[in-house]
Amino acid sequence: MLRVDLDAPLKQRHSVRRIFDRLVAEHEMEGISCSSGCDCVRLRRPEIRVAAGRAPSRVFIPPAHRPGVAAEVDFGDVTVLLRGERPRCFLFTFRMS
């Protein structure tokens, strides 16, 4: 499936979940978990690309802001469970980019 996906358009390639479902349905591989199947595909996909003579795919998304230049701020009220009571508390969040 991964070798066939090398020539398929991006939107038509098998997702990890679809590969797992096909392994269970077509090859009766019911003894593996979805997470172990995902791990295997994650490791094998780059190896198959390199074996086929293609460059390994690399994804880099540049940050929108320089570090420490922008921040997100939000505030609101929340109800928490504290010693069996539900007092109203105020929440302030500050996140640097």
Image: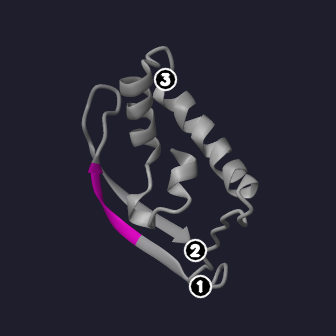
Question: What separation in Å lies between label 3 and label 2 (alpha carbons)?
Answer: 36 Å
Crowdedness near tag 1: few (<14), some (14–19) or many (≥20) residues, C-alpha within 10 Å: few
What amino acid type is highlighted by mark number 1? Answer: His
Instruction: Give the residue pinned by disc 2.
Output: 97
**Residue indicated by mark 3:** 33
Percent across and percent down for residue 90 are: 34, 57
Measured along the vertical axis of the image, is residue 87 above or below residue 72? above
Q: Are marks 1 and 2 in contact (CB under 8 Å)?
A: yes
Residue 77 magenta-drawn? yes
* Quadrant of image for the C terminus: bottom right
Q: Write down the region rendered in magenta.
A: 74-78
**Under tag 3, what secondary structure?**
loop
> Is 17 part of what is drawn in magenta?
no
Direction from residue 58 to residue 17 in the image, left or right? left
Residue to which mark 1 is pinned? 65
> Residue 3 versus residue 36: which sits nearer the camera?
3
| Residue in the foreground of this view, choosing between 8 and 92 | 8
